[in-house]
Amino acid sequence: MAMFDTIIRGGRVSTAADTFLCDIGIRDGRIAALGTDLGEAHEIIDASGKWVLPGGIDSHVHISQPSGDGIVMADDFESATRSAVIGGNTTVLPFCLQEKGKSLRAAVEAYHAKAEGQCYTDVSFHLILSDPTPQVLGQELPALVKDGYTSFKVFMTYEGLALNDRQILEVMEVARDTRALVMIHAENYDIIRFLTDKFEAEGKIAPRFHATSRPVIAEREATSRAISLAELSDVPLMVVHVSNREAMEEIRRARQRGLKIFGETCPQYLVLTENDLDGLNMEGAKYVCSPPPRDVDSQQACWEGLQQGVFSVFSSDHCPFRYDDPQGKLTPKGRTSFRWVPNGIPGVGARLPILFSEGVMKGRIDINQFVAVTATNHAKAYGLYPRKGTIAVGADADIAIWDPERRQTLTHDLLKDGSDYTPYEGLEITGWPVTTLVRGKVMVREGALEGAKGSGSYLSREISALV
Ligand code: DUC
Ligand code: ZN
Ligand code: ZN
């Protein structure tokens, strides 16, 4: 009788720490053995010439999130996790948004109903706190953390979402008491409101003014303030979607002072610039996201943040809207001002190939750094390690097999998400995740989707290793 369900044979295995040549024996969805001459299995996957890595964990995605009047997000759980698995991911963490005046628990239940039976990858939810009432802070949130929702995001900007400094301190106090990890969107609300009103009054309404109205200084100031609030509260903090040198340096300085401040950056800050928002007609809307892509020096700073460990995680911030759609980027109101252009871009399928190609294949980061910032550190930060995020005996068999030589021009057609474009169209990519297994089941084989929707499970999470 075969010892294993599957053996991945002959690959070059890399984790965040090591690279070694070995076979992987998989039994009951877990990694049961690492070694050579592992014997028989029901299925042998030949990985010779390939790199065998932990499946990607994308800890920052938005799926089926309420997005304002008449605007509909392009992905549901089926299409977002389909694109994720095609792009080499095995777990994604979307955000469950509390709408103002409503209960957080009710939002969580409704979000589970959307995901149930739909997923190609494993999923787990962060929370977004928009209304930190005494009931939410005193009861709902602590109970949800106990139930495995161990991270939540707060916003310093946006109508209906922004918390003031006092509210952020109140939330941080609950995080300290419950040992949850706070994630923060750091942009100065008043700077953005002031500039948005001013540009509109001057007739500057095109998508590119989205970028101009959210300057680096607004991000740097809010990052610095968020760090101060976390220091006062004595809580770790994850600053998400960092776009530029000044904000990166704020995080670096805090870390050098011994504070538990962590950073995340995303593909749009490595390969796009604000000039992409200049497209003729409304083409620039395809790149409207917040913080906006900046300039070439900001790209370089984000690379340095990844190379030097200032950023722990590299996520997509997948926040997809269709372009050619009145419920998406071409909403009629968006033509009247950049203020109304749906804010966010797709990226869950493109994240890993972009970092592999631009980072590993171009020598900016090594393969172990790649694994750390795309999988292992996400698992550690969000309470999934060591079950997820590494290749080790006992871990879930979440594995992506990469062909480091495959060349590919990135096109939207490859990504199989629910949007109708990719902001990375035409990027030349070297290296591709050809075969991906989720808990031992082959979901993508040689580039073709093979697993069924509903194979992905919901993951209840432990306390973050960063807390
Ligand atoms: N913040 C995000 O994290 N995603 C999309 C939009 C935003 O402001
Ligand atoms: Zn954000
Ligand atoms: Zn986001």
Image (spheres, rainbow, N blue to C red):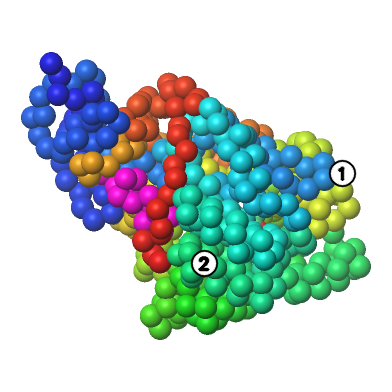
- The residue shown at (14%, 24%) is 3
Quadrant showing the C terminus:
bottom left
Element at label 1 = helix
The residue where tag 1 is placed is 332
Residue 139 as seen in the image, left or right of residue 264: right
**Outermost residue to the left:** 37
Is residue 190 among what the camera can see? yes
Return the x and y of residue 37 as percentages of the image width and height: 8, 29
- The residue shown at (51%, 31%) is 119
17 drawn magenta: no
Return the x and y of residue 10 as percentages of the image width and height: 17, 32
Marked residue nearer the N-terminal end (2 or 1): 2
- The residue shown at (91%, 67%) is 201
Quadrant field for ligand 1: bottom right
User: Is the residue 13 above or below the residue 208 in the image?
Assistant: above
* Span of residues in magenta: 378-391
> Looking at this view, is 3 or 463 the one in front?
463
Residue contact at pointers 2 and 1, CB within 8 angstroms: no
Return the x and y of residue 75 as percentages of the image width and height: 63, 36
Return the x and y of residue 326 as percentages of the image width and height: 81, 38
Residue 131 found in image quarter: bottom right
State the CA–CA distance, disc 2 to disc 1.
Answer: 41 Å
Q: CB at mark 1 closer than 8 A to ligand 1?
A: no
Identified by mark 1, the residue type is Pro
Residue 432 as seen in the image, left or right of residue 110: left
The residue where tag 2 is placed is 175
390 drawn magenta: yes
